[in-house]
Image (tube, helix red, strand yellow):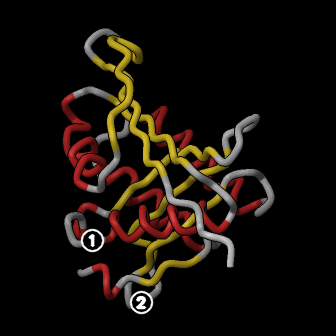
Amino acid sequence: MTAGAVKLRELRAGDRPALESLIRATGVFSEEEVGVALELIDAGIANAACGYLFLVAADERDRAIGYACYGHTSMTDGVYDLYWIAVDPRVQRGGVGRALLRATEDDVRRRGGRMIIIETAGKAEYEKTREFYVRTECVEIARIRDFYRVGDDKVVYQRVLDRPTAP
């Protein structure tokens, strides 16, 4: 599947099973991480004003094949955190993740955002994730050694956004 065939839309209650399936299918998330991801999805389904924002990538049958979860970082001027971005392994490297990231950036700009911060793990299983962020012009700005556990660093990326110019 190419990104051109992907439809980006809001999160729906019916997306939960497909999102859970793809989160698990990636094979990189622990059960604890899966639980946190599902908690945020459930919060977004139950209350659109919960503070978490979602974009869902859907295939031609409108089935969720990826998603991004992000939100404004409290007490900042225009800084947002990208909490989760996950794509069904069957369509990875087809532009779905890139489309989700670009649409997230566009939404953050529309909301007056100027920067996105992304935190991820330094363990080997996350190598493809870190490569994705580098390919999409995110800059590694910090690495905290042994943060999650010994041998698993916290890696922080930054994406500075151009703010729209006033007419």
> What residue would you read off at disc 1?
95
Image-quadrant location for residue 154: top left
Q: How many marks?
A: 2
Q: Is residue 55 left or right of residue 124?
A: right
Which residue lies at the image location 20% right of the left edge and 65% below the top edge?
Answer: 93
Q: Which amino acid type corresponds to the residue marked 1 in the rendered image?
A: Gly
Q: In the rendered view, would you say 21 is above or below 155? A: below
Q: Is residue 123 above or below residue 73?
A: above
Residue at point 35%, 21% (across, down): 143
Q: Residue at x 51, y 70 (%)?
A: 56
Apparent side of residue 86 relative to residue 131 in the rendered image (left or right): right
Mark 2 nearby-residue class (10 Å; few <14, some 14–19, many ≥20): few
Query: Dot 2 lies on which element?
Result: loop
- Please state which of residues 71 and 23 is positioned toward the viewer in this rendering: 71
| Residue 57 position in % (x across, y down) | 44, 74
* Picture quadrant where residue 100 is located: bottom left
Q: Amino acid at mark 2?
A: Arg
Residue 97, x across and y down, in percent: 34, 63
Dot 1 surroundings within 10 Å: few (below 14), some, or many (20 or more)? some
Residue holding disc 2: 61
Calculate the distance from the C-alpha at mark 2 to the C-alpha at mark 1. Answer: 18 Å
